[in-house]
Image: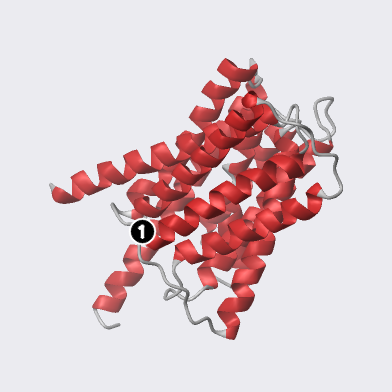
Amino acid sequence: MQAISENTRGALLMTLSMAAFTLNDTCFKLVGKTLPLGQVLFLRGVMASLFLLLLARFFGVRWPNLSRKDTVLIAVRSFAEVGAAFFFLTALMNMPLANLTALLQMLPLTVTLGSALFFREAVGWRRWGAIAVGFCGMLLIVKPGAEGFNLFSVYGLIAVAFVTLRDLTVRRISASVPSLFVTIAASVSVTIFAGILGTQEDWLAMGGREWALIGATAAFICVGYFLSVLVMRVGEVSHVAPFRYTGLIWALILGFVVFGDWPGNLTLIGAAIIVATGVFTMWREAQVRRRLRKIQAAGL
């Protein structure tokens, strides 16, 4: 009974985390209509980084003694976070929220693909098939060669590539390095990048609405980070992880209510394909992990 309670709690935390991140994207898209990207990203980054430092103090996270390997990996992850932020947010300013969010749902597939190609992790034919089908779903969303295809669709795909690099790098960082420390390093890196980007832009005067929206983006992304830390402490990963796809539901609702956007039928079909193949991939990975644990426990 306790395990069911923990799984339910983990699923709820994951759902709320996805809601917070999507609300952050919504507020960023709203304020990005009137202010340059660097200005918004820098101000949000300062607020978010300060919160993360307070969160680290709350959880008692200390500055770790990093090996050379972990230092390089954290630097690569931070670089990937900067690239993901720039390309994702640029695409966000020019694409419907739900369409871009649907592309991000490819991450379980791209991470599995990257693990097989770069880390030589074993991937069976079922997961290879799921990856292939998932990429077909992506093509339905992006529609290369169609009238709706543009540069910002490519930006969205580049953002997926950077986030994949980020997640693959995390897998190689030593377990002794606190995940919150890695997140703080990435947040500070993005803030520094935004400050440099801001020097190439003409910053604009801000009124109450702009300050409120930037404050909201910082608050929502901080809540998302906080909940994502908590969710790793409860429930079974195989049960909780699929609830990350609720982010797409939030994006559909907020995109329609706030911006009046609703994806076309092909986009919805593509998103459904990506979600289905992503859930299947996570389920298969959970099965493989359980099988390996049983083999190790048997001493074989």
User: Could you tell me if residue 122 is visible in this image?
Assistant: no
Residue sitting at 59 percent across and 82 percent down?
Answer: 69
Front residue of this view, candidates 46 and 228: 46
Front residue of this view, candidates 115 and 72: 72
Residue 274: image quadrant is top right
Front residue of this view, candidates 54 and 163: 54
- Identify the secondary structure beneath mark 1: helix
User: Could you tell me if residue 184 is visible in this image?
Assistant: yes
**Whether residue 234 is situated above or below residue 277 in the rendered picture:** below
**Whether residue 259 is situated above or below residue 112 in the rendered picture:** above
Total marks in image: 1
Q: How is the image coloured?
A: secondary structure
Q: Which residue is mark 1?
A: 58
Residue 150: image quadrant is top right
Residue sitting at 70 percent across and 58 percent down?
Answer: 192
Mark 1 is surrounded, within 10 Å at the Cα level, by few (under 14), some (14 to 19) or many (20 or more) other residues, namely few
Report whether 294 appears left or right of 116. Answer: left
Residue 76: image quadrant is bottom right
Residue 30 point in image, percent of width and height: 66, 26
Looking at the rendered image, the quarter that the C terminus falls into is: bottom left
Report whether 223 appears left or right of 13. Answer: right
Residue 46 point in image, percent of width and height: 61, 50
Residue 62 point in image, percent of width and height: 42, 72
Residue sitting at 64 percent across and 34 percent down?
Answer: 28
Amino acid at dot 1: Phe
Residue sitting at 53 percent across and 65 percent down?
Answer: 182
Residue 158 point in image, percent of width and height: 74, 49
Give the residue at the far left of this rendering. Answer: 1
Report whether 258 appears left or right of 20. Answer: right
